Image (tube, rainbow, N blue to C red):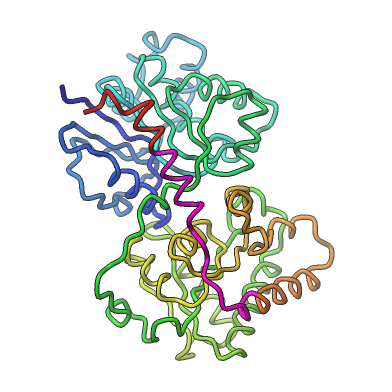
Amino acid sequence: MSQKILLINQHSSNHGDEAAGKALINSLNLKKNDVSILYNTVSEKAIIDFGIQFQKILLTKSLDKISKVLLMSSFFIPHKMLVPFFSKELQEEYLLIKNSDIVISMPGGANIGLYHDWRYLWRLYIALALRKKVAIYSTSIGPFKENLFKQISKNVLSKVNFLSLRDAQSFRYADEMHLKYIKSIDTAFLTQPIIKDFNLESVGVPFKEKDYVVFVANDLTSGHLTFKSVKPEDLKNIYKKIIISLIEKNKKIVFLPQLFANGNDKDYFKLLLDELDYSANPNIIIVDENFSSDIQQNIVRLSSFVIGARYHSIIFSINNKVPFLCLSYENKMKNTLEILGFDKYGVDLSRLVDLKDVFSFENEILSKLESLLSQESEIDNTEAKRIVESCFISFEKDFLQNIN
């Protein structure tokens, strides 16, 4: 019998989340099933082409104050008493969950933890309350404060039918909470999209294969919780010194915006180049932000090196065996490197929060970059592939056997 499957909490506006979602959906045999998707985004421009005909596509629409109170009340009062008072937006999400048989929370960041995403958590809580079969697939969790969000998160995480986590620090948080989980890694490793006869010029890259470096900077001081106290100029100076260093080494640079639709990567790249008077430099280009994650991975595949301050720029590097420097800002980055034994390829940008001597830190980064650039090596992705495939096998065995 065909099952009604609901994919929830799908992040968008980010080609990394697109790649992870594509990899999971492509690995599932869903053609005989009724599949709907609930995005964790408000923008129609951010809807991703997953190559599947969804029965229903629902975006995360803003809630008024009363709806937010009702949502929070759902954790303490039987939801059936509250449903008649839900707003249209909350009713839509509730009914989509209620009318499904299986609920899969898609791969993503630390919404259960760092970002305290109550709506994300509410969907999982309601799915469990409605006795649906629920999976949380290869996400990051934590860090947690000793508060109500942690208590409810622990309750939800302990009751789902399948839980897999994607980085070593998330494993430690789960162990502290005595959760049962599968150790995994980023879901994008499930597939390695190689486009046959891929042409760099057709995507605006005027350089030859292996004759350029990919750089993905990240404006962390414009909204990331960890970097609230960091001066924007301190972060920009790190990026600018990296650019100057690459140009002085006669390296060609391809900026690869991972954010699209609601994102600002492209604008931030332009700001850095404007401040350096490099905007007209023929050896630096910014790729169109609307190219798919598959195209982005092929741009990475043909590069000689990647410098990434966004998580999936590093995942794309490893997936395509390209050497890299990881400018880490969350545990999902540095603790993915930990799993693979790639710590030497990373620098922790979060050190900027408490750092007194920024100049020395800049020199440390440039020194590490120079060292890595001088090494002619290929990244071994065998372990990443083994981990991601092992997780999916467990998912098929322990969760999916009743779908088809």
- Left-right relation of 182 to 67: right
Residue 53 found in image quarter: top left
Q: Residue at x 64, y 29 (%)?
A: 175
Q: Position of residue 366 (x, y in %)?
A: 70, 76
Q: Quadrant of the N terminus?
A: top left
Residue 231 found in image quarter: bottom right
The residue most toward the right is 356
Residue 247, relative to residue 218: is it above or below?
A: below
Q: Quadrant of the C terminus?
A: top left
Residue 94, relative to residue 229: is it above or below?
A: above
Residue 214, relative to residue 60: is it above or below?
A: below
Q: Residue at x 23, y 38 (%)?
A: 29
Q: How many marks?
A: 0
Q: Residue 377 magenta-drawn?
A: yes
Q: Position of residue 219 (x, y in %)?
A: 57, 63
Q: Residue at x 49, y 40 (%)?
A: 139
Would you say the magenta stretch is mainly helix, strand or loop?
A: helix
- Left-right relation of 20 to 36: right
Residue 333, relative to residue 101: is it above or below?
A: below
Q: Nearer the viewer, residue 223 or 67?
A: 223
Q: Residue at x 39, y 54 (%)?
A: 13
Q: Nearer the viewer, residue 302 or 73?
A: 302
Residue range of the region highlighted in magenta in the rendering: 372-392
Q: Nearer the viewer, residue 367 or 42?
A: 367
Q: Nearer the viewer, residue 265 or 35?
A: 35
- Left-right relation of 175 to 2: right
Q: Position of residue 309 (x, y in %)?
A: 57, 63
Q: Residue 48 magenta-drawn?
A: no
Q: Position of residue 106 (x, y in %)?
A: 39, 39
